[in-house]
Image (cartoon, rainbow, N blue to C red):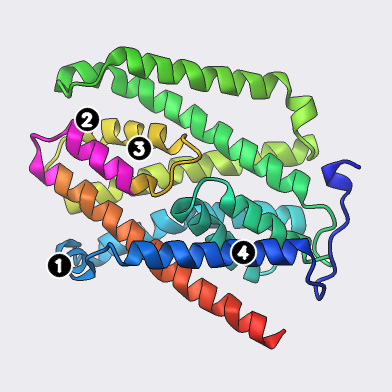
Amino acid sequence: MTPDSLPALPRSERGWSWWLGSAITLAVLAAALMQLAKVDLWRVAAIVPSSPGFWLVFALAYLAGPLGDYVIFRRLWQIPAAGFFALLRKLIGNELITGYVGDLYFYTWARQRTTMVAAPFGAVKDVAILSAMAANVVTLLLMLLAYPLIGQLKLGIDPQAVVASVALMLVISSGVLLFRKKLFSLPPADLRYVTFVQMLRVVGSLVLSGWCWALALPTEPLEIWILLSAMRMLLSRLPFLPNKDVVFAALAVFMIGQDAAVGALMTMMASLLLVTHLVLGLLLVGGEAAGWRRK
């Protein structure tokens, strides 16, 4: 039996997908509580910008991923509005625990809804692969733009390491294209649609994040934001690294140590993203726990 032929579980039945989804929810709760103990909330509140424009752009940048996924699965499965909150849990699980844990949670969420979709594995798999491919394409373009800046800004980055990273992404992307007929399950029209939306999502997230940085620190040159965007995208391609934004902030401070304002901004943004993950994660887990009690 292939993964796509697996029958969905009845919504009221507590099968393996219900228990697995609940376990991932509890793992997100535990990770959120552990991370919350390490965050100085008062310090974060003291350094974030108060501009309404910053907060609007930050919210759009944060929600760009779940909104893109919602547009995709709305077309594929006609998911209800509640599906957006499941996609938020997917994002938070990937960020707080490790990459693709959130995708596994979303798969278990979909399998419990027989009226919506009968075999979700293929669609979740295809969307995850195309998301990675879109991110790879954008990362490669950014690395090409940033490569001349590495030497100009004298940040101590080995250009050979950049070339090796680019080569690895090219090998992975080429492998996906070579075996695409065996990897993908969705019809070609749906694959094209998903690819288009994923590209918009990646580019939109990137532009909005850079806009946030520029609003918070408008005096820095564009070259700095291009380079940092490229480094952030490259770091995001490591699937099993949790808290990527925290790691990115440390990398940015190391890279641009001579610019205290940029280092402070990256640290602030990482803390703000982490707090947002924690607050939303706790709220969503609380809502799901209320659903357990009703059942």
> Total of numbered circles in the picture?
4
> What secondary structure is the magenta-colored segment mainly?
helix
To which quarter of the image does residue 161 belong?
Answer: top left
- Label 3, residues with CA under 10 Å away: few <14, some 14-19, many ≥20: many
Name the residue that disc number 4 marks: 23
Dot 1 or dot 3, earlier in sequence: 1
Name the residue that disc number 3 marks: 232
Dot 4 or dot 3, earlier in sequence: 4
Examine the rendering and report whether any part of residue 255 can be seen: yes
Amino acid type of the residue tagged 2 in the rendering: Glu
Q: Position of residue 220 (x, y in %)?
A: 14, 40
Q: CA distance from mark 1 to mark 2?
A: 28 Å
Q: CA distance from mark 4 to mark 3?
A: 30 Å
For the residue pair 63 and 92, the one nearer the viewer reads as 92
Amino acid type of the residue tagged 3 in the rendering: Arg
Q: Position of residue 158 (x, y in %)?
A: 26, 16
* The magenta segment: 246-262
Q: CA distance from mark 2 to mark 3?
A: 14 Å
Name the residue that disc number 1 marks: 46
Identity of the residue furthest to the top in this view: 160
Dot 2 or dot 3, earlier in sequence: 2
Q: Secondary structure at mark 3?
A: helix
On the picture, is 67 further left or further right than 157? right
Amino acid type of the residue tagged 4 in the rendering: Ala
Quarter holding the N terminus is: top right
Q: Is residue 255 magenta?
A: yes
On the picture, is 108 further left or further right than 117? left
Name the residue that disc number 2 marks: 223
Q: Secondary structure at mark 1?
A: helix
